[in-house]
Image (cartoon, helix red, strand yellow):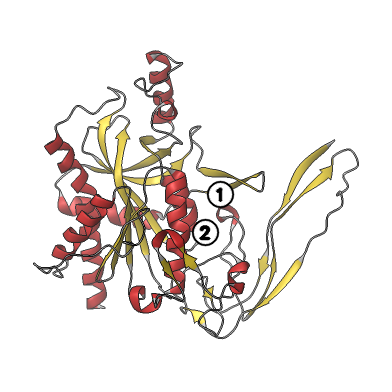
Amino acid sequence: MKDFSTVQSVASSSSSCRRRRGLRGKKHDSRAVASRTPAAAQPDVLQPPRLTVFYQVTFPVDTESGGVINISRRKLKMPLDEEKNGACDRSIYVNNPHLDSLTDDILYHFNLGTSTHNLAAMFGDVKFVCVGGSPWRMKSFTEYIAKELGLSDPNAEYPNICAGTDRYAMYKVGPVLSVSHGMGIPSISIMLHELIKLLYHARCTDVTVVRIGTSGGIGLKPGTVLITKQSVDSVFQPRLEQIILGKPVVRSTELDGELAEELLQCGKDLAEFDTVIGNTMCTLDFYEGQARLDGAFCSYSEEDKQRYLAEAYAAGVRNIEMESSVFAAMCKLSNLRAAVVCVTLLDRLKGDQLTSSHDVLNNYQQRPQALVGHYIKKKLKASKKS
């Protein structure tokens, strides 16, 4: 009889710097990359100039004898050169040793690349990244934040940096990058892979990433802005399970609690709409996965739906959307400070379809950007004083 056991990667080190470091080689196109343990079990690893890395290996085990079947562990040593991605600040991690062999890292869905674009010159000053589903919404946010930061130009067009592709849209004004991610976990995960590499290649540090969007509320009045405490799956567990090489890999979906509290305070500062912190349930689809009764298929009753949503509410879930789990997991793995800020368009305990007017819904959708815009202004003002 066989099952599968997993040996987690272990990185042991000693360093005087208390924060983790993203690491680079001396050459511009070389990247020295360290492997890390899954975020939920990761200690505050300190990295020395040279690091011994054990990669995660999944292998078959004979449960009757307890013996390992035809497998060995590889221990890889990677020299970490003098040039670092930042010092003791929050630097960007990529966790892929294969990137070292690339002469050009092509960010295909952004229509960008390390040999065709000077990413450090284009994006090196980025401190805030705001992502959302709709290209239109992210362009609107760019125009809004430009005005809020006093960087707006009456003649400014804010061109789409990813104009060479129709997959995503990207806009930049000052230290703020705005990127669309489409709908659902697959779409946002593709975008995040390339966004994280972009920030890494650009040598960005101290970056805060916020997803702004819409959601269905549970027990909240429409128009409430919810800041996610934890992203949970459909059985209310704070985890993302992904199948890699045919085997399940579970990652933590923990978000930055301090950042969530700072955003909550911004909501109190504005005092224009209700702002709360709660858990967000991330689902794989919009209809059956969210217990809707109005899809093309439905095999459950209204009572079943209400019972499930009541269980979600009891588990601390206050809204439902389709991107937060992979967003939280990937940002945590990359050492990015992250938050999810979504407005609730309706209370799912009272219905499934949107009946509010276009003007009302448009007003709701502007609330997350107002909250995040206030946060960005507040942080930039504080940094100027210091």
User: Is residue 225 shown above or below 357?
Assistant: below
**Which residue shows up at 62% across the image and 67% down it?**
98
Q: Which residue is under mark 1?
A: 251
**Which residue shows up at 40% across the image and 20% down it?**
305
Question: Percent position (x, y) of residue 208?
Answer: 36, 63
The amino acid marked with disc number 2 is Leu
**Which residue shows up at 19% across the image and 27% down it?**
355
The amino acid marked with disc number 1 is Arg
User: Which mark, residue 112?
Assistant: none
Residue 304 lies left or right of residue 215; in this view the side is right
Frontmost residue, 171 versus 226: 171
Residue neighbourhood size for the residue with mark 1, other residues' Cα within 10 Å, grouped as few (<14), some (14–19), many (≥20): many
Numbered disc 2: secondary structure: helix
User: Is residue 199 shown above or below 5?
Assistant: below
Whole-angstrom CA distance, mark 1 to mark 2, is 9 Å
Question: Percent position (x, y) of residue 21?
Answer: 52, 73
- The quadrant in which residue 9 appears is bottom right
Marks 1 and 2: CB-CB under 8 Å? Answer: yes
Q: Which residue is under mark 2?
A: 333
User: Is residue 131 shown above or below 3?
Assistant: below
Residue 353 lies left or right of residue 43; in this view the side is left
Residue neighbourhood size for the residue with mark 2, other residues' Cα within 10 Å, grouped as few (<14), some (14–19), many (≥20): many
Q: Earlier in the sequence, mark 1 or mark 2?
A: 1
Question: Percent position (x, y) of residue 76?
Answer: 73, 70
Frontmost residue, 233 versus 153: 153
